[in-house]
Image (cartoon, rainbow, N blue to C red):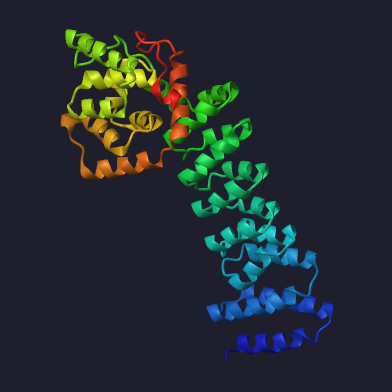
Amino acid sequence: MSEASSFLQELDEAVSRGTPESRSRALWHTTNLMIAGRYSDDEIWTFGEVIGRLADEIEVVARTELAKRLARFDRAPVNIIHKLAFDDSIEVAGPVLQESERLEAYALVANACTKGQTHMLAISKRKSIEERVTDVLVTRGNKEVVNSVANNSGARFSESGFLHMIQRAEGDSILAEKLGLREDIPRHIFQQLIAKASDDVKKRLQQERPAMVDHIQSSVSDVTGALQSKFGPVSRGYFVAKRLVATQHREGNLNENSISGYAQAHRLEEVTIGLSLLCSLPSDVIERALFDKNRETLLILAKSLDFSWATTMALLFLGAKDHRITAKDLKDTETEFGRLNVETSRTVLEFYQSRKNGGDADSDTERKPALMMQ
C-alpha cells in the first residue's frame, strides 16, 4: 500500500473518533493534500470517500467552501463531486453544478430531473451544456432558467428544444429576442420565431440580424416582372392551365392528389397555380420556392398543406436541375421534412401571407385556401 493510501486509511479510522473541530481540520488537510499531490485514480477515489465522510459531519458553510474549492479542480473525485452536486443546499451544489468539469451529462440530467429550480439555474450557467441537458432545462425550468440557458452561448439545443422554447417565448419578448439573437438557431426555426414574435421584437431582430430577416422577406417578396420565369407563364398555355386549375379549385377538387399528379407529369404551370391557390400566395413566390436550391420554403409550404413525403418529393424533383437529386441530398431533405411540424409550418405560412398583405395571390377565385379549412 502506498504512503498516501496508508495515510488515508489512518485518517478514515480517525474520522469516527474525532471532534467537530478535528474533523474540520482533517477535511482541509486532506483536501489540500489531494490538490497539491499527484495521485492515481484509485487514490483520488479514496480521497473522495474520506472527504465525503468528513463533509457529512460539517456545517453548510464549510461544505460550501469545499464545493468552491473542488469545483475548479480538474481531478476532483467524482464521488464527492456528485455528493456535493446533489446537496439540497444550493450554496453547496451551485458552484459544482455551474463549474465542475467532472460532472457527466447523465448526472446533470438526473440533477435537473430530481432537484429544484435553483439547481437547474446553476446548470444553465455552465460554460458548455449538451443537448440532452438543455432538453430537460427548457421543459422543466421556470422562466428564469429558460431565459438563462437561452442567453448561454455555450449551450446546445436540439430541434425539439428550440421548438419548445419558441412555445415558451409566446408572450415573453425577452426570451423571444434572446432566441432570435442566437447564432446557432436554424433558419427555419428562426422563421417560426419571427412568425410568432411581437412587432417590437421583429423590429429589434431586424436591426440586430438583418441578414436572417432579409432572407425570410426575400423568400416571399415580389420578383421584378412577376410571372416572367424562363418557362414563360404569361404564355397562352399558362392561361389555359390557370382556367383549368381555378375551376378545380372552385369545385373543391384541387388537392394533394392533383398537385402530385401535375408534379409527376412535370406540368410546372399547373403546379405553380395550384400551390398559389392552396397557399394563398402569388405564383412568383411559389416559383421561387420550387427552384430555390435551399428548398426550405418549399418544405414548409408542403408541410403546411400536410402533404406526404411522396408528394413533396415530386415537387422537389420538378424544381431540381434536370429533375435530378442525389440520393444523399434526398435523404437529408427527407429528414429535414420529417422534423417540421404541420401547425408551426402553417404559422410560418401565415407570416408569408401577411408579408403579401393577403391581396397578391391569384384572385380570380374567392375560396379560402384549403389549409385554412382543415
The C terminus - image quarter: top left
The residue depicted at 22 percent of the width and 14 percent of the height is 241
Front residue of 250/137: it is 250
User: Extreme bottom residue here?
Assistant: 1
Question: Where does the image place residue 173, in percent across and percent down from the top left?
Answer: 62, 30
Q: Residue at x 26, y 41 (%)?
A: 329
The picture places residue 222, in percent across and down from the top left corner, at 36, 14
Number of disc labels = 0
Q: Is residue 241 left or right of residue 361?
A: left
277 left or right of 109?
left
Rendered position, 199 above or below 99: above
Residue drawn at (70%, 89%) of the image: 10
Where is residue 51 shown, x and y percent of the image?
A: 69, 76
Residue in the foreground of this view, choosing between 112 and 181 = 112
The answer to whether residue 104 shows anywhere in this view is: no
Side of 265 where 191 appears, left or right: right
Up the image or down, 20 lies above or below 100; here it is: below
| Residue 333 position in % (x across, y down) | 31, 40
Residue 236 sits above or below residue 5 on the image: above
Q: Quadrant of residue 235?
A: top left
